[in-house]
Structures are given as C-alpha cells and as structure tokens.
Image (cartoon, rainbow, N blue to C red):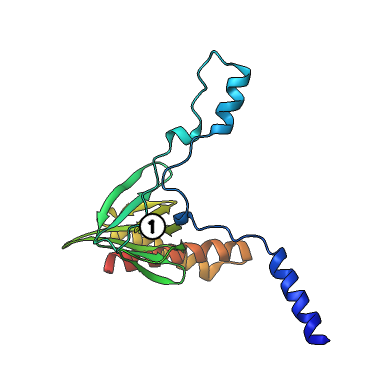
Amino acid sequence: MFRQATARLLSRSAAARPKARPFSTDLESAPAADQAFVDAWKKVAPNMDPPKTPLSFMKPRPPTPSSIPSKLTVNFSLPYASELSGKEVDMVIVPATTGQMGILPGHVPTIAELKPGLMTVHEGNDVQKFFVSSGFALVHANSYADIIAVEAVPVDRIDPTLVQKGLAEFTQKLNSASTDLEKAEAQIGVEVHSALSSALSG
C-alpha cells in the first residue's frame, strides 16, 4: 500500500510540474513581430501605420552553429563606451570571482561575476590587456560572449608609481582603521591596488 501511495504522489507531482523553460538558444533566432500590438493598433487607428516597438530595433540573435566555430565573438562594454563590438578572437581570459576563467569557442553557457583583475583578449599573437574593476561575463552557446564591466582601462595606461603609492596609502589606512567602515573601505582599496599591481606584473 505504501508503494502504491508513493507511486500516485510521484505521478501527480510529475503531471503538475510546469513545462521547463527553453534555453535562449532554443528560441527562434529572429525575434517575432509584435503581432498582438499591431492588431490592437489597427482596431483603434486603422488609417495610421503602427509605431515601431522595441522588437523592431533588435538584431536577430545569431543561431547556434552545428559545429564549434574557430573564433569566439566578443562584445566588451562599459557604461559609457563599447571597447569591443562583435570582435572575433581566439580566446578571452577574465578575472572571475572563482578564479581566472578562459573562454574559448564552444564554451558552455555561463554567467560569471568579475572581480578586480586582468582581462586578456587573445587574437593570434596579439594580446590586448585590460584592467577591469567588476562586472559580469555572459557566455552564450553560439560562441558569443558579452562582457560588461563597471570600469576598465588598458593596462598600458596605468601608472605603476601611482599604483604603489595608492597601495601604501590604503595599507596604512587599514592598519590605523578604528571602525568597521574604515576597515572595509581600506580593505577594498588594498585589494583593488593589489590587483592593479598584479595586472602590471602579469
């Protein structure tokens, strides 16, 4: 009897379970027109063309290739600028909170939080180096990667003297901090300047 009751409960829970949401890569590559909006507009103003909706301005999502492509397409954006847009590269290495993460063509879909550190973009023998403060890396199944950083600067524009000066100042503040807030602010400064120093030496 116990087995029968258990089987009934399991069958009920399976039937009541909602249908799994598809991955973004399982959806149509081209956004469908907002037909419901168009139909509603024609009822209200049949003599006027409907205005464009956000879907009208969206680029079709690139389909997932059947085989692993030879290149990774990277978009690297800041709040005020786009550093890389649709650039095809061999590999990107980002400073994730779990450690350095290499992204190659065919990488599994991933979302990674970034910490202060060195990001490198590899294209043949050419390597671009950026220091990023924080952000996210979104890796898609179609060998596209979107990297969004709060702040980033090419490593060759960083002044090593100012980095060492800032590290010394924040280390002194950390040693003399008397409140939790002062300690937290000083600790952040030490970590960021230590990451800057490591980026310069790496």
Pick whichever, 10 or 62, lies toward us.
10
Residue 146 drawn above or below residue 68: above
The local crowd at label 1, few if under 14, some if 14 to 19, many if 20 or more residues have their Cα within 10 Å, is many
User: Extreme top residue here?
Assistant: 47
Q: Is residue 39 left or right of residue 11?
A: left
Instruction: Say which amino acid is labelled 1.
Output: Val
Badge 1 is on which residue? Answer: 132
Residue 179 in view here? no
Residue 34 drawn above or below residue 177: above
Q: Is residue 108 left or right of residue 39?
A: left
User: Residue 187: where, in percent of width, then height?
Assistant: 51, 66
Quarter where residue 46 is shown:
top right
The residue that appears at 52% across and 68% down in the rendered structure is 174
Residue 150 drawn above or below residue 115: above
The residue that appears at 50% across and 18% down in the rendered structure is 49
For the C terminus, the image quarter is: bottom left
